[in-house]
């Protein structure tokens, strides 16, 4: 049997098993009329750019051909999720220019953390609690304004909020904030429960406002990011056989284990919710460590950057320009072929990598319960 045929067989089996185990009213694929996303730069479609200035070119070069508020050469996982439901790409809630929120909104901003800014050192003041305030305000005011003129075409219908898919992809910056404070691995682990307590409260808040379908990504292998490998002290003994920093990945895995426990508890506390935990870590780690087999190359080297072992310089990030003799020169430019590269700018993934990651998680193979994205509105009995 050909590999791609086997993939379809496995997908079909997962889909069939899901139908048998669902316990909500309908067992068919979901028809989400809208999506609402909370997160950081892994899913930011223009929030930070709207607040503090556009992510510079060559960001956006591959798909949008201009900067599009995303820290990538093209589309993000959240964009491929929207495509899979036939929805337009999510506009950033903070972006007032040309935005249409009739199909949902994106509250994610690059640098965001779960914990409020006075307790971490993330790059964005828009932590998860702030994103929830923005969502609540958006939810409350939309039914008022969508009855007035043009707004009926720009804002979600009232019932969309209960029928929407709510996506969470956040937590990575809470861990890197600890590295910036020179915390040890054990010290980082010690504050994870409080971070996840605040995360749990955020999910409950959306549920209390009528949200029912949740798609929650765990955090990726930070120890394989050029940004982390270049910036933070690491010994040769702490580098695994693939070149990743083991201590950083250990903390990420600990965070993910505790996050999964939180999700399982939330299912018991929120009986009407369908909550899917998605193991993005495993998918990203496989892509990085098996890059050559998967048609990619140089997974630990940034495609867009400037100098150094990992083509990453924190002071000269992707798109950085300098002025020479009165003329601006782009010194942190893109690589010749981003379509075969994994890492875009030292921190984020290329469109090609994002697409591959989406293709792996969409069929439910890395989900708990093992439920496909298209059925994320369905509740299942399995909690393991």
Image: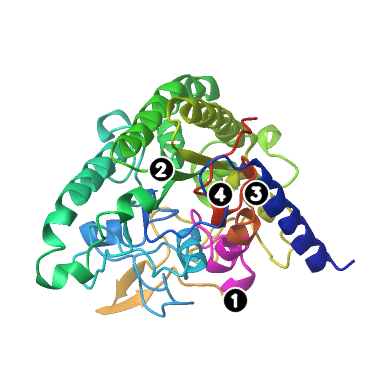
Q: Which residue is mark 3?
A: 19
> For this rendering, which residue is in front, 271 or 304?
271
Question: Label 3 vs label 4: CA separation?
Answer: 38 Å
> For this rendering, which residue is in front, 195 or 237?
195
At mark 1, the secondary structure is loop
Q: Position of residue 69 (x, y in %)?
A: 34, 65
Q: Is residue 383 above or below residue 296?
A: above
Task: Give the magenta range.
Answer: 338-356
Mark with earlier residue (3, 2): 3
Whether tag 3 and tag 1 are in contact, CB under 8 A, the answer is no
Q: Position of residue 210 (x, y in %)?
A: 32, 41
Q: Which residue is mark 2?
A: 212
Q: Position of residue 252 (x, y in %)?
A: 56, 35
> For this rendering, which residue is in front, 12 or 200?
12
* Disc assigned to residue 337: 1
Neighbours of disc 1 within 10 Å: few (<14), some (14-19), many (20+):
few
Mark with earlier residue (2, 4): 2
Mark with earlier residue (1, 4): 4
Question: Label 1 vs label 4: CA separation?
Answer: 19 Å
> For this rendering, which residue is in front, 124 or 371?
371
Q: Which residue is mark 4?
A: 225
Q: Residue at x 43, y 64 (%)?
A: 318
Mark with earlier residue (3, 4): 3
């Amino acid at each position: 049997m050909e590999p791609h045929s086997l993939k379809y067989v496995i997908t079909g089996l997962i889909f069939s098993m899901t139908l048998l185990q669902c316990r909500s009213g309908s067992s068919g694929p979901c028809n989400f009329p809208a999506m609402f996303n909370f997160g950081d730069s892994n899913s930011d479609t223009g929030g930070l750019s709207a607040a503090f200035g556009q992510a510079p070119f060559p960001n956006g070069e591959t798909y949008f051909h201009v900067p599009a508020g995303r820290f990538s050469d093209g589309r993000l996982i959240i964009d491929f999720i929207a495509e899979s439901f036939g929805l337009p790409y999510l506009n950033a809630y903070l972006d007032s220019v040309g935005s249409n929120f009739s199909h949902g909104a994106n509250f994610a901003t690059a640098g965001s953390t779960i914990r409020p800014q006075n307790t971490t050192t993330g790059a964005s003041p828009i932590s998860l609690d702030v994103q929830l305030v923005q969502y609540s305000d958006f939810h409350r005011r939309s039914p008022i304004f969508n009855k007035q003129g043009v707004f009926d075409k720009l804002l979600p219908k009232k019932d969309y909020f209960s029928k929407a898919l709510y996506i969470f992809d956040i937590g990575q910056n809470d861990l890197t904030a600890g590295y910036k404070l020179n915390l040890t691995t054990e010290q980082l682990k010690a504050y994870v429960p409080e971070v996840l307590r605040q995360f749990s409260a955020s999910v409950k808040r959306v549920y209390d406002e009528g949200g029912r379908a949740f798609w929650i990504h765990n955090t990726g292998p930070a120890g394989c990011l050029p940004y982390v490998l270049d910036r933070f002290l690491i010994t040769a003994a702490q580098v695994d056989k693939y070149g990743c920093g083991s201590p950083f990945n250990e903390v990420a895995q600990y965070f993910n284990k505790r996050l999964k426990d939180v999700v399982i508890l939330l299912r018991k506390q929120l009986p009407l919710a369908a909550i899917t935990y998605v193991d993005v870590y495993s998918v990203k780690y496989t892509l990085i460590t098996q890059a050559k087999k998967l048609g990619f190359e140089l997974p630990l080297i940034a495609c867009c950057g400037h100098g150094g072992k990992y083509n990453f310089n924190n002071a000269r990030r992707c798109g950085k320009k300098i002025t020479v003799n009165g003329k601006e020169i782009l010194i942190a430019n893109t690589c010749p072929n981003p379509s075969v590269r994994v890492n875009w700018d030292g921190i984020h993934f290329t469109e090609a990598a994002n697409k591959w990651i989406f293709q792996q998680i969409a069929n439910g193979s890395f989900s708990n319960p093992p439920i496909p994205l298209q059925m994320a509105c369905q509740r299942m009995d399995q909690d393991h």
